Amino acid sequence: MIIKNNKSVNYSAGSSNGDSGVDPDHEDVYKKNAEDYIGELEGIDQEYENKINDIPEEDRVFMASERAYQYLTERYGFKRRFYMGN
């Protein structure tokens, strides 16, 4: 999933720990916000996974003009196809 070993999740979890160190009076708020955000990301990932699993594996092709979406193709098992514009 995008979320597993994802920089956004790791950053959110780490950020909440760092924020609580700077502002310990609001540690609970930072942790709750991080948990909520991670939960939202996990929900998005599950939705992606469900929709992508509806596509037969042989038809899972991702086309782009650059390699910016490599993480997406690796996570969800797309074949990558790159094209060059005029």
Image (tube, rainbow, N blue to C red):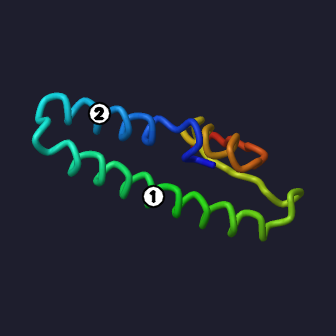
Residue identifier under label 2: 17
The answer to which image quadrant residue 5 occupies is top right
Mark seen at residue 7: none
> Dot 1: few (<14), some (14–19), or many (≥20) neighbours within 10 Å?
some
Residue 71: x and y, percent?
A: 61, 39
Residue 22: x and y, percent?
A: 13, 29
Give the left or right position of residue 26, taking residue 52 as reference.
left
Between 51 and 41, the one nearer to me in the picture: 41
Quarter holding the C terminus is top right
Residue identifier under label 1: 39
Q: Which residue is drawn at 46% across and 35% down?
A: 7
Residue 61: x and y, percent?
A: 76, 53
Q: Residue at x 70, y 51 (%)?
A: 62
Amino acid found under the numbered disc labelled 2: Asn
Between 86 and 45, the one nearer to me in the picture: 45
Between 4 and 79, the one nearer to me in the picture: 4
